[in-house]
Image (spheres, rainbow, N blue to C red):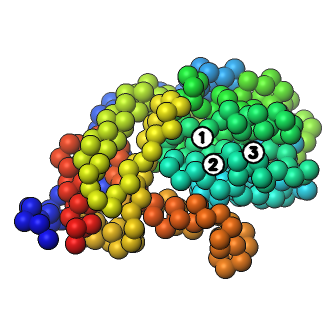
């Protein structure tokens, strides 16, 4: 071992610090909440309407529809595209389970695709291999805040007459060749889960689209299948964003671009500090546009031991995701499918997400990097 200063767990670095962010916007948030309380209009009122317009403008789409969660954004989006029993939808195996569950919920079949090793994003060539006559849609996921390679996916969709739903839960604000993600496919599905880059103070989600027909269908689906009140034309849901969340999100949206650049600064600092640490592979950038660093995810060998030791040194990290979806018990199980998607399986063993949030200080990023260097030298 080197004689460099030995790090102990004196400085704690959380993986995410929502309290730090709240302190910077407390007054604005309280004003926004109070105004909803004064109005006493809680469901589908002026705040939701305004947020829908603002998110549509932000993403560069004509329409946006507030729903109850990012998962519901995917389910309602798929339903609006007409996906149902007998249909296949291609999703990456390396994502949050909700991407696949949304497909299963509608009685359709999620068909998995592998990822690219550098960016952890879905591999368009693997997607192409999974297309069958039953394929109806593709859900690329902009994982960790970086756009998936959309051009080849869009051309596959055109060629095979498929719909494209962008899972933008982790990547609002990211760009792909000059366009905001969520605006490139037929539909973009956004999550406002509290830990996401634009997080509410509870569950929430939104679907954005340029299609008037999909927009109309989504408005109906989130409210019991009715456009006209108490007049149902189809099976729908109760899935709505509420006014309190919308008011909070409108405040936070005003800060989103600043927060995204702060996240990029933290990421560059990590790149510089970790670039020469042996055994660490820092996250690749695909060069297609702005990364918004929902996560800063490295690769390391012996990941679980590294994570445990980092924890002892005060550094909290996360593993997104330890079990690929094709190996989840509900989708066939561990043994049955091991080896199907080797790049995904390797990523699930090596990926480690370091603390990242806009307010992360220089001291904290130094502590994380020094702790990691020390653990890997042990
Ligand atoms: C968070 C997330 C979702 C689900 O969003 P919820 O708002 O939690 O329902 C879907 N896909 C991905 C990739 C996510 O990270």
- Please indicate whether residue 305 sits to the left or right of residue 238 in the image: left
Where is mark 1, residue-wise?
A: 148
Tag 1 or tag 2, which sits nearer the N-term? 2
Q: Would residue 124 be visible to someone looking at this image?
A: yes
What residue is shown at x 62% (from left), y 45% (from top)? 141
Rendered view: 3 above or below 31 = below
Residues 360 and 224: in front is: 360
In three-dimensional space, the C-alpha distance between marks 1 and 3, rounded to whole angstroms, equals 12 Å
Rendered view: 267 above or below 343 = above
Residues 277 and 263: in front is: 277
What residue is shown at x 69% (from left), y 55% (from top)? 113
Secondary element at image label 1: loop
Instruction: Tell me where residue 53 sits by quadrant.
Output: top right
Q: Would residue 40 be visible to someone looking at this image?
A: no
- Give the number of the disc on residue 202: none
| Residue at the extreme bottom | 335
Label 1 lies in ligand 1 vicinity (Cβ under 8 Å): no
Secondary element at image label 2: loop
Position in image of residue 278 (x %, y %) = 28, 59
- Nearer to us: label 3 or label 2: 2
All told, the count of numbered labels is: 3
- Please indicate whether residue 259 sits to the left or right of residue 58 in the image: left
In three-dimensional space, the C-alpha distance between marks 2 and 1, rounded to whole angstroms, equals 7 Å
Label 2 lies in ligand 1 vicinity (Cβ under 8 Å): no
Where is mark 2, residue-wise?
A: 122
Image marks 2 and 1: residues in contact by CB distance under 8 Å: yes
Position in image of residue 287 (x %, y %) = 49, 33
Tag 3 or tag 1, which sits nearer the N-term? 3
- Give the number of the disc on residue 138: 3
Rendered view: 133 above or below 26 = below
In three-dimensional space, the C-alpha distance between marks 3 and 2, rounded to whole angstroms, equals 11 Å
């Amino acid at each position: 071992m080197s004689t460099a200063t030995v790090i102990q767990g004196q400085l704690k670095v959380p993986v995410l610090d929502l309290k730090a962010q709240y302190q910077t916007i407390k007054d604005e948030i309280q004003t926004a909440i109070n105004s909803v309380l004064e109005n006493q209009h809680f469901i589908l009122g002026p705040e939701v309407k305004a947020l829908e317009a603002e998110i549509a403008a932000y993403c560069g789409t004509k329409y946006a529809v507030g729903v109850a969660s990012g998962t519901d954004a995917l389910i309602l989006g798929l339903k609006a595209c007409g996906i149902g029993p007998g249909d296949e939808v291609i999703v990456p195996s390396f994502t949050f389970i909700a991407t696949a569950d949304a497909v299963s919920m509608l009685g359709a079949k999620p068909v998995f695709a592998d990822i690219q090793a550098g960016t952890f994003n879905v591999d368009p060539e693997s997607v192409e291999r999974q297309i069958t006559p039953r394929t109806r849609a593709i859900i690329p996921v902009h994982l960790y805040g970086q756009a998936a390679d959309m051009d080849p996916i869009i051309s596959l969709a055109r060629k095979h007459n498929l719909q494209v739903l962008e899972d933008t839960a982790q990547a609002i604000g990211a760009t792909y060749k000059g366009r905001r993600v969520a605006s490139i496919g037929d539909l973009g599905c956004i999550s406002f889960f509290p830990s996401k880059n634009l997080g509410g103070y509870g569950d929430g989600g939104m679907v954005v689209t340029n299609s008037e027909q999909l927009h109309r269908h989504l408005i109906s689906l989130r409210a019991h299948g009715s456009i006209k009140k108490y007049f149902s034309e189809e099976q729908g849901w109760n899935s709505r964003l509420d006014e309190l969340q919308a008011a909070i999100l409108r405040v936070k949206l005003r800060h989103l671009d600043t927060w995204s650049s702060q996240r990029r600064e933290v990421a560059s600092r990590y790149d510089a500090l970790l670039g020469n640490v042996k055994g660490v592979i820092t996250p690749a950038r695909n060069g297609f546009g702005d990364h918004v660093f929902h996560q800063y995810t490295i690769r390391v060998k012996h990941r679980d031991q590294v994570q445990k030791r980092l924890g002892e040194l005060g550094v909290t990290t996360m593993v997104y995701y330890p079990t690929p979806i094709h190996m989840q018990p509900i989708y066939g199980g561990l043994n049955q499918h091991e080896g199907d998607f080797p790049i995904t399986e390797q990523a699930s063993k090596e990926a480690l997400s370091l603390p990242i949030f806009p307010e992360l200080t220089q001291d904290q990023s130094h502590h994380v990097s020094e702790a990691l260097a020390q653990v890997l030298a042990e």
